[in-house]
Amino acid sequence: QVRLVESGGGLAQPGGSLILSCVASGDVSSIDVMGWYRQSAGNQRDLVAVKTRGGTTNYSASVKGRFTISRDNAENTVYLQMNNLKPEDTAVYYCNAPGAWPLEYWGQGTQVTVSS
């Protein structure tokens, strides 16, 4: 089992920045990919950004150039630096880590609200 605990989030103004953190604990040796998804009211949960243990990244087109995912493998932590935030970035952000198939782990979610 793997536990994912998120921190960060909150309220930001348009154009502002926030950073999210997610720490994995437990059977972390089974984890290669870690990343972030988000879900806004009435919508499905969508990929934001993911990063493999080896450093390969993948971003949603809507955040590319504004968000940066980074990872500290030694600390089993993944970060999401969010810059130039827009109101449409408002959502609950979830940390995600696929485990050995068919396991998949999720954090509890953290609210990000972008509003003036």
Image (cartoon, rainbow, N blue to C red):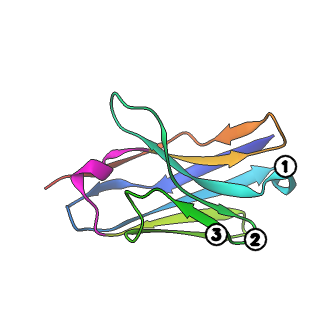
The mark found on residue 71 in the picture is: 3
Point 72% across, 63% down: residue: 76
Q: According to the image, label 2 marks what residue? A: 54
Locate residue 56, reporting x and y percent.
67, 69
Q: Which residues are magenta?
A: 84-92
Look at the image and tell me in which quarter the C terminus lies.
Answer: bottom left
Q: Which quadrant would residue 38 be assigned to in this image?
A: top left
Q: Residue at x 69, y 48 (%)?
A: 97
Q: Position of residue 88 (x, y in %)?
A: 27, 49
Tag 3: amino acid: Arg
Quadrant of the image for the N terminus? top right
Check if mark 2's residue and mark 1's residue have beta carbons within 8 Å: no
User: Considering the numbered disc 2 on the image, is that residue within a helix, a strand or a loop?
Assistant: loop
SS type, badge 1: loop
Front of the two marks 2 and 1: 2
Q: Residues within 10 Å of mark 2 (few under 14, many from 20)?
A: few
Give the CA separation, mark 3 to mark 2: 10 Å
Residue 49 percent coordinates (x, y): 53, 58
**Amino acid at the residue labelled 1:** Asp
Q: Secondary structure at mark 3?
A: strand
* Labels 3 and 2 touching (C-beta < 8 A): no
Residue 3 left/right relative to 42:
right
Please report the residue visible at 50 percent of the width from the left and 55 percent of the height from the top: 7
Q: Earlier in the sequence, mark 3 or mark 2?
A: 2
Q: Return the residue at label 1.
A: 27
In this picture, residue 88 sits left or right of residue 23: left
Residue 51 in percent (x, y) is at 64, 63
